Amino acid sequence: MRETPWGPLPVSDAHVHFFSHQFFRSIAAQKEIDLAALGLLLEWQMPPEDARILADSWKNALDANGIDRAVLIASVPGDHESVITAVRRFPQNFYGYMMVDPTAPDAPTQVETALTTGHLHGLCFFPAMHRYSIHDERVVQILDLASRGPRPIIFVHCGVLSVGIRKKLGLPSRFDMRFSNPIDLHPVALRYRELKFIVPHFGAGYFREALMTGDLCPNVYLDTSSSNSWMRYQEAQMDLRTVFRRALEVFGPQRLLFGTDSSFFPRGWNSQIYEAQVKALYEIGVEASEARMLLHDNLQQLLS
């Protein structure tokens, strides 16, 4: 439980990046430095190889902030074992998502194997990052697989994709925005009505398109994570209160999922994102029952 303007409410976070040892090792290799030097450049803590220790750190951070559960996202393809280790260690505190690159030849096998562990709850697709269309037959193959099994959540990053750590280190990001429009998800979500799709960051600049897609597809959800700095791209002046008001009008309180986009230590869980979102929700008159749905219940219902 966490104290909120509506009184004590349970809070769960739908969007936390599990920056593991393997994640930082891949970044260090691209920068051509060792992990110790990377930590000094970033002024971040480099996690040990044992993912259980990083899981302990995240559990302690969540407990200290009164957070019930969090979705841990493997932030490079092939790092899902780190997340599975964390979920296995604290199944009452974590849900696990893996990043999928469907252009990799072994992607379907990786997904199938990971899902059989019972500790993986979602598949994350980043079409702009890995430069493919969500309509690609390689994506279809994985969604067919997902629809036959335990039916994991399908997380699809749309809109502006900016990886802060890459910017900080001066590493190029060869993303392709042609594959970022939430409208592309429309026929996919209609085809796979049995699956639930999440678009993070309110569509990250494609807010109108995310609203349209959600209005047409009742199995599409939005997560509210990050600073939502994409608002500066809107023609009319927009703030977080306006974003929440319009999202609630289209999606209702049942299809919005609170998230922070937390990622690294020593910062840990990003309470500033939480405070800004709760303030906006309270100021537009959201009732306690609706706040509870958005902050906790919707995620539990999707993943429990």
Image: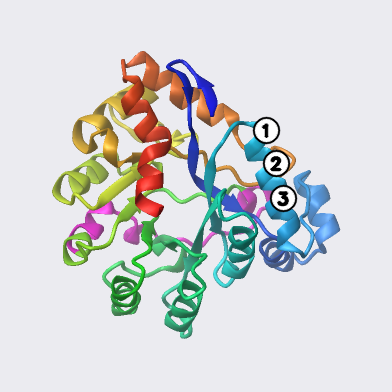
Find residue 25 and report its horizontal and vertical position in percent: 73, 65
Please name the amino acid that badge 1 sits on.
Ala
CA gap, disc 3 to disc 2?
6 Å
Q: Mark 1 packing: few (<14 Cα in 10 Å), some, or many (20+)?
A: few
Please name the amino acid that badge 2 sits on.
Asn
C-beta proximity under 8 Å, tags 2 and 1: yes
Residue sitting nearer the eye, 182 or 9: 9
Q: How many marks?
A: 3
Quadrant of the image containing the N terminus: top right
Q: Which mark is residue 56?
A: 3
Please name the amino acid that badge 3 sits on.
Asp
SS for callout 1: helix
C-beta proximity under 8 Å, tags 3 and 2: yes
Whether residue 193 sits left or right of residue 123 in the image: it is left
- For residue 287: magenta? no
Q: Residue at left 81%, top 60%?
A: 35
Q: Residue at left 66%, top 53%?
A: 170
Q: Which mark is residue 60?
A: 2
**What's the magenta region?**
165-187
Residue 239 in sight from this viewpoint: no
Whether residue 205 sits left or right of residue 114 in the image: it is left
CA gap, disc 3 to disc 1?
12 Å
C-beta proximity under 8 Å, tags 3 and 1: no
Residue sitting nearer the eye, 142 or 179: 142
Above or below for 129 versus 90: below
Q: Mark 2 packing: few (<14 Cα in 10 Å), some, or many (20+)?
A: some
Q: Residue at left 68%, top 67%?
A: 26
Q: Which mark is residue 64?
A: 1
